[in-house]
Image: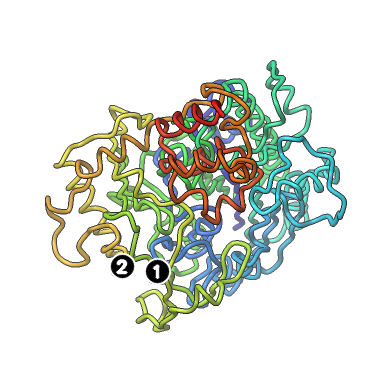
C-alpha cells in the first residue's frame, strides 16, 4: 500500500469549485471531487502554520499549551511512527517555516526530505544592495521580509523555477522512482497559495481586470483600508496563485492515472487554514476572530479500500484526524495520546475545538460556532508549556525565561515535566468579545447571536473538550470557565461582552474617506511623531500609543495602516478626530 498527501497552505474552501467557487479556474479540484470523497464539515484545530503541522504529526490539539513551536520530545510523530514500522516516508516542501527555529524538528521525522527555497521572504539569496521594488513596499514590515522577497523574486522568474513547481517536480519524481515499491508515504507540501500571491503570467491571464493602483499582492494582517479596486486586485492575484496550485494538483492526478496508482494508493488533499481576502473587512489571519473563512477547510480523500468516489460526507472532522487516518491505512497502531480518529470512522465527534495560543478558544458542533474571549482585558493567566523554547524565527529571550518553573507532567508528556513560563500574544482577543453564530441562519457569520441556552450548551461542549485535552488551569481562569464542576449560567459571556464586540466589529473607513492636509492618516508614523504639533494630536486622542515600542518599529508605516493592524485600539470615531485635526495643521 502507498499514500500521497498533497498539502496546501492558506487554501480557501469557498473559492474551490467543489465548494461553490464559481469564478475561479480550478478544474482539477473539480476533477478530484469526482474521484474522491469531499468532506463538507472539516475544521482546523491548532493554528496557524506550525501548530497545525504539529497536529498533523501528533493527532492532538496543542494550542492550549503552546504557541508556535517545534515538535516536543514527548510528541508522537505520525511520519516517524510509520518509519519505525517499515513504511518509507518522504517529505518534499517549499514551506520555509520548517527550517526556522520554530519548526526545526519536523522534517527529521521522515526517512528523507527535500526543500526548495524562495517563498515569503525566505532568507535565501544574499544581496547587500537594495533590490528594485515598488515604492509602496519600502517599509519596515515583518522584519524586512518584504525586501528579501524582492531579492528572491528574480531567481524564480519563470514557472519552472518557482518553488511550487520544483516541489511538485520532486514529489512526482519520488512517485515515479518508487512506483513498483510498496509501503511508502510521500507528503507533497507547497506553501502556496499563502501570501505573497506570486504566480506567473499565464495564471494571471485567467483573471483579466482593469487595475492601475500600486503593486498589491501581499496584504498585511489587518483591517481593510484599501480601495475597492485594490481589494479586487488582491483577490485576483490570490486566484491566479490558486489556479497555479490547481495545475500542480492536476499533475498529481495525471500521474496517478498514468501509473495506475488508484488501485492501491491513498490520496489526501488538505490545507492548514484559509485566509481572509477582504471578507468582513479583514485581511489575513491571527489578528481577528477565527471566522469560518479561516477554519472551515477543504478536505478530499481517496481510499482504495472502499473505492468511494463522488461522495460528500457531513461528518465533523478535523486536522487531528489526518495522522490516525494514515496510521490506520498502514495498519500501524495509534498511540494513546492521539485524540483524532481515522476518516473511515463515521460520526467520530459531537463537537470540534480550534484556536490559537492566547486567542479565542472556539468550538463548533457543525451548526453553531462559539468563540470564547478572555474574561478580562489582561488576557491572563497565559503560560507556555514546552521543552523547546523557540518562537517562529528566534529563541526565547532570557527575559521570557526569567520566571521559568517546572510544571507537573500532563498525561501526554509521558511523565516528563515541562518548562512553564508566561506567554505572550501580539494581539489581544478581548477587544472582540465572546461571539456565537448560527451557521444555518447566518452562514456568513454577520450577526452574532445572544442566546443563553445555546451559549450554555456550546460552553459545556468547550469545557468537555478542554478537559479531554488536559488544558492547563490558567486557560480556564483566562476564559472565566470552571476547571472542575459544571458550566452554569453564571459563566456566560456573550451578553456581558456584547458592546465591546459590536465596537470591534465596526469596519474602519478607507483612507480616502478621511480629510487630507499637510498631515493625514496616510502620513508615516515617523513623520507624525517627529513633528511637535502633530505628535500632540496623537497623544490627545491616542494616549499611550505614541510612545509604544510598536510605533517605533513601524515608523515608515502610515498611521492608517497601523490603525488597521491594531483593530479596536483605534476606534473609527477617534481616528476621524485625529484625521480632522491633522488635516487642519
Mark nearer the N terminus (2 vs 1):
1
* Label 2, residues with CA under 10 Å away: few <14, some 14-19, many ≥20: some
Residue 436: quarter of image: top left
Q: Secondary structure at mark 1?
A: strand
Q: Residue at x 58, y 74 (%)?
A: 84
The dot on residue 474 is: 2
Give how far across and how far down residue 137 sits, in percent.
71, 39
Residue 101 lies, with reference to residue 568, above or below; the image says: below
Quadrant where the image shows the C terminus: top right
Q: Can I make out residue 331 in this image? A: yes
Q: What is the quadrant of residue 507 in the picture?
A: top left
Instruction: Tell me the SS state at disc 2.
Output: helix
Measuring from the top left, give residue 291's x and y in whole percent.
41, 39
Q: Position of residue 9 (x, y in %)?
A: 59, 46
Color scheme of the displayed model: rainbow
* Residue at which label 1 appears: 383
Where is 181 relative to 369, above or below? below
Along the line of sight, the residue nearer the viewer: 271 or 2: 271
Q: Is residue 455 left or right of residue 251?
A: left
Dot 1: within a 10 Å radius of its alpha carbon, few (fewer than 14), some, or many (20 or more) residues? many
Where 390 falls versus 277 (above or below)?
Answer: below
Q: Is disc 2 in contact with disc 1, using a CB cutoff of under 8 Å?
A: yes
- For the question of whether residue 307 can be seen, the reply is no
Q: Which mark is residue 464?
A: none
Residue at image coords 69%, 44%: 139
Describe residue 166's horizontal placement relative to residue 252 as left or right.
Answer: right
Q: From the viewer's perspective, is 547 left or right of 342?
A: right
Q: Position of residue 198 (x, y in %)?
A: 72, 38
- On the rendered image, what quadrant is the N terminus found in? bottom right
Query: Toward the viewer: 357 or 322?
Result: 357
Compute the Cα span from label 2 to label 1: 7 Å
Amino acid at each position: 500500500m502507498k499514500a500521497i498527501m498533497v498539502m496546501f497552505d492558506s487554501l480557501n474552501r469557498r473559492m474551490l469549485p467543489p465548494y461553490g467557487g464559481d469564478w475561479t479556474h480550478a478544474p482539477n479540484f473539480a476533477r478530484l471531487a469526482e474521484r474522491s470523497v469531499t468532506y463538507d464539515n472539516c475544521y482546523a484545530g491548532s493554528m496557524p502554520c506550525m501548530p497545525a503541522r504539529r497536529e498533523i504529526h501528533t493527532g492532538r490539539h496543542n494550542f492550549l499549551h503552546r504557541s508556535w513551536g517545534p515538535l516536543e520530545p514527548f510528541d508522537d510523530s505520525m511520519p516517524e511512527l510509520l518509519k519505525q514500522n517499515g513504511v518509507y516516508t518522504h517529505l518534499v516542501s517549499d514551506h520555509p517555516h520548517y527550517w526556522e527555529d520554530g519548526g526545526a524538528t519536523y522534517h527529521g521525522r521522515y526517512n528523507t526530505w527535500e526543500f526548495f527555497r524562495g517563498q515569503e521572504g525566505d532568507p535565501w539569496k544574499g544581496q547587500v544592495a537594495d533590490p528594485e521594488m515598488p515604492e509602496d513596499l519600502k517599509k519596515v514590515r515583518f522584519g524586512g521580509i518584504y525586501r528579501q522577497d524582492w531579492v528572491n523574486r528574480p531567481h524564480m522568474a519563470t514557472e519552472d523555477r518557482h518553488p511550487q513547481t520544483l516541489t511538485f517536480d520532486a514529489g512526482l519524481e519520488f512517485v515515479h522512482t518508487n512506483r513498483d515499491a510498496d509501503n511508502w508515504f510521500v507528503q507533497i507540501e507547497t506553501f502556496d497559495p499563502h501570501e505573497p500571491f506570486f504566480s506567473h503570467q499565464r495564471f494571471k491571464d485567467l483573471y483579466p481586470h482593469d487595475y492601475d493602483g500600486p503593486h498589491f499582492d501581499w496584504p498585511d494582517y489587518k483591517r481593510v483600508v484599501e480601495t475597492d479596486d485594490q481589494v479586487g486586485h488582491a483577490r485576483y492575484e490570490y486566484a491566479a496563485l490558486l489556479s497555479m496550485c490547481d495545475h500542480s494538483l492536476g499533475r498529481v492526478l495525471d500521474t496517478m492515472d498514468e501509473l495506475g496508482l488508484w488501485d492501491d494508493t491513498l490520496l489526501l488533499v488538505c490545507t492548514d487554514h484559509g485566509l481572509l481576502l477582504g471578507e468582513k473587512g479583514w485581511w489575513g489571519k491571527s489578528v481577528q476572530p477565527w471566522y469560518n473563512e479561516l477554519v472551515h477547510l477543504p478536505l478530499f480523500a481517496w481510499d482504495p479500500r472502499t473505492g468511494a468516489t463522488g461522495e460528500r460526507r457531513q461528518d465533523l472532522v478535523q486536522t487531528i484526524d489526518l495522522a490516525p487516518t494514515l496510521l490506520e491505512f498502514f495498519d500501524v497502531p495509534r498511540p494513546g495520546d492521539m485524540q483524532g480518529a481515522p476518516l473511515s470512522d463515521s460520526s467520530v465527534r459531537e463537537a470540534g475545538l480550534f484556536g490559537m495560543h492566547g486567542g479565542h478558544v472556539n468550538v463548533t458542533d457543525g451548526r453553531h460556532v462559539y468563540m470564547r474571549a478572555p474574561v478580562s482585558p489582561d488576557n491572563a493567566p497565559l503560560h507556555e508549556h514546552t521543552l523547546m523554547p523557540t518562537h517562529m524565527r528566534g529563541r526565547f529571550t532570557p527575559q521570557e525565561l526569567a520566571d521559568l518553573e517546572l510544571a507537573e507532567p500532563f498525561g501526554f508528556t509521558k511523565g516528563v515535566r515541562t518548562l512553564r513560563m508566561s506567554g505572550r500574544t501580539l494581539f489581544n482577543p478581548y477587544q472582540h468579545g465572546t461571539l456565537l453564530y448560527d451557521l444555518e441562519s447566518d452562514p456568513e457569520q454577520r450577526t452574532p447571536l445572544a442566546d443563553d441556552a445555546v451559549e450554555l450548551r456550546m460552553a459545556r461542549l468547550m469545557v468537555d473538550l478542554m478537559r479531554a485535552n488536559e488544558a492547563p488551569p490558567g486557560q480556564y481562569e483566562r476564559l472565566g470557565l470552571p476547571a472542575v464542576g459544571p458550566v452554569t449560567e453564571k459563566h456566560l459571556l456573550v451578553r456581558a461582552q456584547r458592546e465591546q464586540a459590536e465596537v470591534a466589529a465596526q469596519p474602519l473607513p478607507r483612507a480616502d474617506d478621511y480629510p487630507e492636509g499637510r498631515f493625514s492618516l496616510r502620513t508615516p508614523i515617523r513623520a507624525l511623531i517627529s513633528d511637535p504639533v502633530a505628535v500632540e494630536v496623537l497623544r490627545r486622542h491616542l494616549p499611550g500609543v505614541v510612545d509604544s515600542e510598536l510605533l517605533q518599529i513601524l515608523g515608515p508605516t502610515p498611521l492608517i495602516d497601523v490603525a488597521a493592524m491594531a483593530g479596536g485600539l483605534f476606534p473609527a470615531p477617534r481616528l476621524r478626530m485625529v484625521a480632522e485635526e491633522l488635516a487642519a495643521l
